[in-house]
Amino acid sequence: MPNKAFITGVTGQDGAYLSQLLLNKGYEVYGLVRRLSTPNYWRLEELGIRDKVCILEGDMTDSHSVNSIVKSIRPLEVYNLAAQSFVATSWQQPVLTTEVNALGTLNVLNAVKLYSPEARFYQASTSEMYGNSNINNTQDEHTPLHPRSPYAISKLAAHWFTINYRESFGMFACSGILFNHESPLRGIEFVTRKITDGVARIKCGLSDHIALGNLDAKRDWGFAGDYVEAMWLMLQQEQPDDFVISTGINHSIRDFLDAAFSAVGISNWEPYIRQDPRFMRPAELHELCGKNSKAQEKLGWRPKVAFDELVRMMVEADLKRIEKESTAKTRYEPSLVAGH
């Protein structure tokens, strides 16, 4: 019998790449989605796996809903990726963010404990939990945690719930402290995708600027497709543990702009950028750079896609999307010929 995997947040960037990875390994993949009037399966469709994932509707904040799903599947691996993950929104909706990210994780952990206790559990933790803490300008598994947004605080609670269930009930429960990871499947609301989409539109003559916040913030950016492999590897170990997953190299927003505009042959991006105070964080997180030596040593994991390659990949994907949109628009526009 194939392994059964249950993924919350299956329609997100990581959920889609993880589904693809697990399907390629012969798993049965079940994915939790919120009940929406218009389902959002574009990432699964783009990877060509929509019809291979068993979609289950449910609510992370409803323990009865989560219990029922876990009881019916009895998965061997559970990947908790669902979250309100846009940091800016967490200041506007801190209660919702906490309910989904912290209470939702607790509901999944409890459901696994009750109805699938042999399952291995993965929690999607985040480098945002560190805030501005660092040791020698890097963060690892021992760096103090000092979150600086409602999002990061909610994820820290989920992180500690995972550790507590591991220590209290002997569950195989791991947390991956993932640093920023991007891809062509990243949501348009995130700054990286906002940049690559904006660059593509500028190149195609559809826009003349991109509005951004702090250009000096530095992040450790990797490819999401690489990072989901680390998630899987954590659940294949003999003992559960927590791991930093990162590239070990950080870049500023300015560096990202350099790479993105260079991908379309524009050397000077400054005339196309407008800084907007609306996009500044109330409490800024200045610099993140993960130390991934533990993951290299114990998981045998290393990132494969370099920064410039990642940015170029995202820009090229957005150029193709715009070309596809333009073709579809031309195809369905009414004829402009006289008399028609």
Image: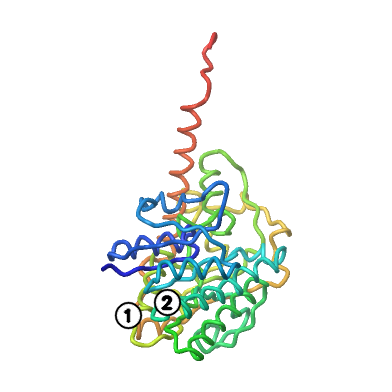
Is 159 located above or below residue 340 in the figure?
Answer: below
Placement of the N terminus among the 4 image quadrants? bottom left
Residue type, mark 1 in image:
Gly
Residue with the most extreme left position: 1
Identify the residue under disc 1.
300
Alpha-carbon distance for marks 1 and 2? Answer: 28 Å
- Counting other residues with Cα less than 10 Å from the Cα at mark 2, is it few (<14), some (14-19), or many (20 or more)? many
Asked whether 215 or 316 is in front, the reply is 316
Q: Residue at x 67, y 73 (%)?
A: 149
Q: Name which of mark 1 and mark 2 comes first in the sequence.
A: 2
The answer to whether residue 288 is seen in the rendering is yes
Q: In the image, is 13 to the left or to the right of 97?
A: left
Most distant residue in the top direction: 339
Q: Secondary structure at mark 1?
A: loop
Neighbourhood count class around disc 1 (C-alpha, 10 Å): few under 14, some 14–19, many 20 upward:
few
Residue at which label 2 appears? 116
Q: Is residue 209 left or right of residue 233?
A: right
Residue 89's disc number: none
Q: Nearer the viewer, residue 45 or 198?
A: 45
Asked whether the residues under the numbered discs 1 and 2 touch, taking CB atoms below 8 Å apart as contact, a structural biologist would say no
Quadrant of res 119: bottom left
Where does the image place residue 31, in percent across and percent down from the top left?
44, 61
Q: Position of residue 61 (x, y in %)?
A: 60, 67
Relative depth, front residue between 291 and 190: 190
Visible in this render: residue 248?
Answer: no
- The image's colour scheme reads rainbow
Q: Position of residue 138 (x, y in %)?
A: 52, 82
Q: Is residue 133 above or below residue 57?
A: below
Amino acid at dot 2: Ser
Quarter of the rendering containing residue 312: bottom left
